[in-house]
Image (spheres, rainbow, N blue to C red):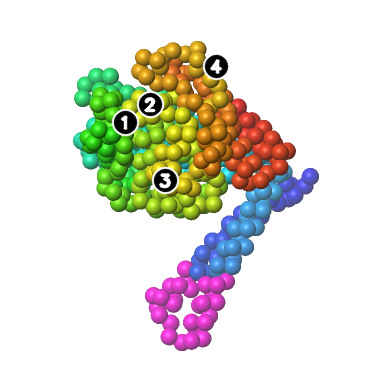
Amino acid sequence: MRLIDWLKPGIKVKRWIVYAILGVLMIAFGLNELVVHRVYYFSYKLFYLFLNVTGVLVIYVSVTEGIKSVIALINKGYIKLSLDNKKMENLIYEKRLLVKGPKIVVIGGGTGLSTMLRGLKYYTSNITAIVTVADDGGGSGDLREDLGILPPGDIRNCILALADTEPLMDELLQYRFTDGKLKNQSFGNLFLAAMDGISDSFESAVQKMGSVLAVTGKVLPVTLENMKLKAELENGNIVEGESYIPEEALKQKSKIKKLMVLPEDAKPVLEAIQAIKEADAIVMGPGSLYTSVLPNILVKDIAASVRKSDALKIYISNIMTQPGETDGFKVSDHIKILKKYGGKDIVDFVIANADKQSLENNNKYADDGSTPVDLDVEAVEKLGVQVVKANLVKFKNGLVRHNSEHLAEVLIQTIMEKKLLYDRKKILEYMYLSQRIKQKEK
């Protein structure tokens, strides 16, 4: 090969760089004459305008041709990438798969919501988590009282669930101080509180934290107002505060009769309403029915937007009842309460646990009054809701949790079959490729 042939691609790149600089100079000279010297003759004005337009065209051609020359250098091996072509191709393909995934809005709070999100992020990047801000207990309650910010706990958990972070970073953000004035306070809560201090709003702080941690999708507070929960018990007593409602219901041996939010006209975050309108599926739960799911539904316009949406509306039923909230509840009882506060068309499908055997062998919850939620299929179907059965039980440190991986599989498959009308072969291919991404990232 002749020396000149070997150097040609590099010479072309340099040539287009020179042309781009020339284009910039032409624009600068033309603007200078028009603006600074204020040319008055029409013929001169026309000339300098033509010079500016020519400069723009020269820059455009230089950039496009320069990129082509760089690609030529890569193809000829003069420039080597740190990733080989196969890895780069797989990476691009996998990201395209996630981008093309269904648009899913999840509504709730607490541990249940973040558990589900950990599995869901491997199937789509089009996730919007709308999270309650009614928490007033624990470290979140302390920060809310001391700094006057919205409670960060549930939002922090959702951000971490969707984040692409190293295990050490995840461990750091979940770390709780054990001594001193920061005792029982999460470092992740403090991180979000500090971000709020340098941001224009709490919503902006959440978005910035999501950007720092490379979050898949979005996490949004349901409202930016100082929202609190209030409940009327069946004995007529009023209880205020998310953390006190189940506690007082148990102590007074009186069920929750009516749940309210203060202020009653709390306005939702506009981006949350927009996400609901554009969603392929809206998922409520899993989580505490009265203190995690319903607080979002009671925020102005949220329930109405869900009802009006063409999205598939899915409720993830809890596996166990919650003392002070859902004592003795079956799946149908959860649906009835959801419809009571959200309206008739608030839910189309319910995904419920069908694995009773695993729960029967676990007596850990017997002492605190929790029992497995019975799946009464006929009663649910009479309410106009279709049932999707799945074995969802997973034990973590002796506690019953939803199996996030299997729940995500069931959820995605339900959405694709019932809403997006994909054929079986396409669904299986999508699920297989998503599993590959999950295994690779782990």
198 vs 363, left or right, is left
Label 2: element kind: loop
Residue located beneath label 2 in the image:
327
Residue 36 lies in the magenta-colored region: yes
Q: Residue at x 54, y 52 (%)?
A: 310
Alpha carbon of mark 2 to alpha carbon of mark 1: how far?
A: 8 Å
Q: How many marks?
A: 4
Query: Which region is colored magenta?
Result: 28-54
Q: Residues within 10 Å of mark 1 (few under 14, many from 20)?
A: many
Alpha carbon of mark 4 to alpha carbon of mark 3: how far?
A: 33 Å
Q: Residue at x 44, y 24 (%)?
A: 320
Coordinates of residue 302 in the picture (x, y in percent) = 40, 49
Residue located beneath label 3 in the image:
342
Q: Amino acid at mark 4?
A: Gln
Residue located beneath label 4 in the image:
357
Residue located beneath label 1 in the image:
255
Q: Kindly indicate the quadrant of the structure image that contains residue 123.
A: top right
Alpha carbon of mark 2 to alpha carbon of mark 4: how far?
A: 20 Å
Coordinates of residue 402 in the picture (x, y in percent) = 49, 26
Q: Kindly indicate the quadrant of the structure image that contains residue 17.
A: bottom right
Label 1: element kind: loop
Q: Nearer the viewer, mark 1 or mark 3?
A: 1
